[in-house]
Image (cartoon, rainbow, N blue to C red):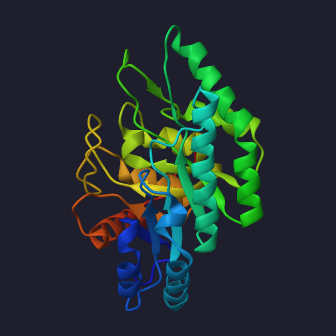
Amino acid sequence: MPGSERIYGHNIPHHALEQCLEAHKAAIPRALEINIPFSKQPDDIFPSNRVSSILELREQTGTQLSFHVPFKVNITEKIPRFRKLNAKYLLSCIEVGAELGARTVTVHLGTFYWFPVEQQTRKKALDRFVQHIDPILDACERRGLDLALENVVRLPKWSEYYHLGDSPQDFAEIFKRIDSPRLGFCLDTGHANIGGHVGDFIQALGGHLTNMHIHDNLGDDDNHLMVGEGSIDWPDVTGRLKALGYNGPFISECRHRDPEECFARLERYFYNASPVNS
């Protein structure tokens, strides 16, 4: 938003990157988060000639870039062979993201089968994450970008499998056990609002916040509504962020709506918000 200190951006498919960067030539520098499809390898999507042209455009606009890794990537996979393949894909995203000058790669923690006891299998999945994340963070350190862990929707009880990262407690455990300046948290407001409260995530994890996905819902479906059209308490959210001094990026994931509308609505909430200390 013109005159705002906050960094706003939106989520795009990889094939739209050049078009969006061209559009940004006439706008203030913002952020673009690139969705990477699981069906293709990142270095096939971004061959060297395409990387060169994107870097030239990015230099003209000053736009911040980041990667959004496919949901299917699961580095807590129990079967070693599959876990290694997932880790290899994530490492490739980090390498290509660094070539493009991306500041962040956002990833989900993964899934696990809860049988026979969810508390025990969740702990084992978290243990696998902690045990196998070091090479990923080493690559981030070497290439100069951050890994942002995104919270996900809480699945109904007795689902076939559960998500890691569906509560603040999973992330608190990870950040307690892993001390890395390259590891951060991506708050997805819509995901946090389903079966929980956005403020709880900010209170527990605000100090690790490095990226945000912005959208709304009524607490029962991840339908990516426009800011203010669901049940999220935006005055509380923006007040907490104001107290933290977090100024972005804020990535719009409001489906089928103009990102500028999302930015304008969020900016109004910030303008009227009083800082809320956690």
Q: Is residue 53 above or below residue 178?
A: below
Residue 76 position by quadrant: top right
Tally of marks: 0
Residue 269 position by quadrant: bottom left
In the rendering, at what x and y percent does residue 188 appear? 44, 49
Front-most of 64 and 228?
64
Q: Is residue 54 above or below residue 239?
A: below
Front-most of 62 and 261?
62
In the rendering, at what x and y percent does residue 136 appear? 69, 49
**Quarter of the N terminus within the rendering:** bottom left
Examine the rendering and report whether any part of residue 102 can be seen.
Answer: yes
Front-most of 237 and 262?
262
Q: Would you say 213 lies left or right of 186 here?
A: left
Q: Would you say 206 lies left or right of 191 here?
A: right
Examine the rendering and report whether any part of residue 103 can be seen.
Answer: no
In the rendering, at what x and y percent does residue 247 appear? 54, 66
Q: Residue at image x 64%, y 68%?
A: 98
Q: Residue furthest top?
A: 116
In the rendering, at what x and y percent does residue 26 appear? 37, 92
Q: Residue at image x 42%, y 37%?
A: 197
